[in-house]
Image: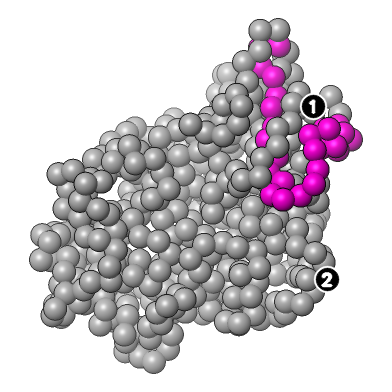
């Protein structure tokens, strides 16, 4: 049924059940429907029509959920936009989307576009008519970690069965904690699909390790999606402090978004148990995905699992495109049964003979389990030696004083490239010399040429990093 009708159906079934809550506002399912219908009245007054893209540039709040629900109700498509992107990139996204309306912006930020400020304003009356249906249910952007963010228009229409399960690895019912930015593809998808099946959403404004653990305990959270950066930061809390948080309400966690280090994954398995941890490898495009349970991971450490949901994966040579044998490293390609799962708005998709790639290097074993090594474009070639930046980052992040790390290549007249790493140590007392010795103990000859120190976070709240923006001397321009 249309998503708007699915939300109405859920409200009819359990009107007083919690639909969504942030730190200021809490709505039952019935209250969410009323707010959705009032917001829909505002959208219609602004001229929003069926199949329009409506940019949503709101923080993690109840209003974000209301706005998206209203967009679906009037038959348009929500286009989440990360406000932390440079404004010039935000404008580029809005122009490519040809957005009918930008929600959560000032008039001078998007000249020539209709905007609605993030003020909680809704229509005077309620739209009580039937839910309309857009041809695409979402249009998030890619992370931009490998270049300008792309608008990924989903191939699936704005219809959903609220009595169905989203996926085998997603619980049918849950109290779901949302700590990653809803303007990113994976948090948006899992939160909204959860909402459509009756999940109660508890939204935090942003990720903080202690606040997240407090919210799990306070709200009796049963399911949460995390990224490895979040997992690492929570593990860095003193063991005696972590022991004070009762996580028994958690049925399971899902982690996604980036390769997870062996150190971090093992730490979480020891903390909550392998049976409560699921990992998924996928992209905003949903062109294919793999899954692995914690118990499977223990038998194949570092793997991101085998294809599920009608997906196929293969590894091909970066030079010839020929499919490689088990154990050989190459470009990971994927495809999925059925109609196209997406199209890019305003740019071409890198599809070859039906196979799509996220640009990742990896390998597979004879049983079909996949390992992801790093982005092909990020590989450091130092004097002929190929170094995956993520191996340096994971080695440094295993140090108890390192909150996060980023590695990248810099031009070098002699070697072609030299490997540079930046270590975010927050307020810890550790220097580059000690960290270099630590890295050499793990990486040997693959250690970085230089380590720089930072006290600022290097990744965003979704665990993403743009290595291309790091320059000699430190942070991005």
- Label 2 element class: helix
Q: Is residue 238 above or below residue 125?
A: above
Does label 1 or label 2 sit earlier along the sequence?
2
Position of 77 with respect to 29 (left or right) is left
Q: Secondary structure at mark 1?
A: helix
Image: magenta residue range:
415-443
Vertical arrangement, residue 374 with respect to residue 153, above or below: above
Estimate the x, y position of residue 130 in percent, counting from the top left.
Answer: 16, 76
The percent position of residue 184, horizontal first and vertical second, equals 45, 53
State the image coordinates of residue 107 (x, y, percent, origin top left): 20, 51
- The residues bearing labels 1 and 2 have C-alpha atoms spaced at a distance of 35 Å
Q: Badge 2 local density, few (<14 within 10 Å), some, or many (20+)? A: few
- Answer few, some or many: residues within 10 Å of disc 1's Cα (few below 14, many 20 plus, some between 14 and 19): some
Residue depicted at x 48% and y 71%: 203
Q: Is residue 64 above or below residue 100?
A: below
Q: On the image, numbered disc 2 is attached to which residue?
A: 240
Tag 1 residue = 446
Q: Is residue 200 visible?
A: yes
Q: Of residues 52 and 369, which is closer to you in this image?
A: 52
Residue 37 magenta = no
Instruction: Tally the numbered discs.
Output: 2
Q: Which residue is at a point 35% across and 38% down the rendered structure image? A: 89
Could you say which quadrant of the image residue 373 lies in?
top right
Residue that appears at 74% across and 35% down: 392
Q: Which mark is residue 295?
A: none
């Amino acid at each position: 049924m249309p998503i708007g009708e699915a939300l109405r159906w859920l409200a009819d079934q359990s009107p007083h059940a919690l639909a969504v809550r942030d730190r200021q506002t809490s709505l039952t399912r019935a209250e969410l429907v009323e707010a959705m219908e009032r917001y829909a009245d505002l959208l219609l007054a602004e001229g929003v029509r069926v199949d329009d893209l409506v940019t949503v540039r709101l923080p993690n709040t109840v209003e974000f959920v209301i706005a998206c629900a209203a967009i679906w109700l009037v038959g348009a498509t929500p286009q989440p936009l990360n406000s932390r992107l440079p404004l010039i990139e935000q404008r580029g996204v809005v122009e490519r989307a040809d957005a009918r309306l930008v929600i959560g912006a000032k008039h001078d930020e998007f000249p020539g576009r209709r905007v609605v400020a993030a003020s909680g304003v809704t229509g005077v009356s309620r739209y009580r008519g039937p839910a309309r249906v857009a041809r695409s249910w979402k249009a998030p952007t890619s992370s931009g970690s490998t270049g300008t963010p792309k608008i990924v228009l989903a191939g699936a229409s704005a219809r959903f069965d609220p009595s169905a399960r989203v996926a085998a690895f997603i619980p049918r019912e849950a109290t779901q904690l949302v700590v990653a930015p809803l303007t990113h593809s994976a948090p948006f998808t899992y939160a909204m699909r959860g909402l459509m099946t009756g999940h109660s959403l508890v939204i935090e404004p942003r990720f903080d390790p202690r606040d997240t653990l407090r919210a799990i305990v306070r709200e009796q959270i049963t399911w949460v999606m995390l990224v490895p950066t979040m997992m690492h930061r929570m593990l860095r809390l003193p063991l005696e402090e972590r022991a004070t948080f009762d996580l028994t309400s958690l049925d399971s966690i899902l982690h996604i978004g980036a390769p997870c280090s062996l150190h971090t994954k093992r730490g979480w398995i020891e903390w909550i148990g392998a049976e409560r941890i699921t990992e998924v490898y996928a992209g905003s495009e949903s062109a294919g995905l793999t899954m692995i349970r914690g118990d499977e991971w223990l038998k194949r450490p570092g793997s991101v699992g085998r294809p599920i949901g009608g997906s196929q994966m293969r590894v091909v040579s970066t030079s010839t495109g020929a499919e490689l044998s088990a154990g050989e490293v190459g470009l990971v390609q994927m495809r999925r049964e059925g109609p196209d799962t997406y199209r890019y708005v305003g740019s071409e998709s890198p599809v070859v003979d039906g196979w799509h790639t996220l640009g990742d290097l990896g390998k597979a074993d004879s049983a079909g389990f996949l390992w992801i090594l790093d982005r092909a474009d990020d590989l450091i070639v130092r004097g002929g030696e190929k170094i995956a930046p993520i191996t340096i980052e994971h080695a440094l992040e295993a140090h108890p004083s390192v909150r996060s790390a980023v590695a990248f290549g810099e031009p070098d007249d002699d070697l072609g490239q030299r490997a540079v790493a930046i270590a975010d140590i927050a307020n810890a007392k550790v220097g580059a010399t000690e960290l270099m010795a630590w890295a050499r103990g793990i990486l040997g000859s693959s250690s970085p040429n230089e380590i720089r120190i930072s006290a600022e976070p290097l990744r965003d709240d979704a665990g993403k990093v743009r290595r291309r923006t790091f320059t000699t001397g430190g942070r991005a321009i």
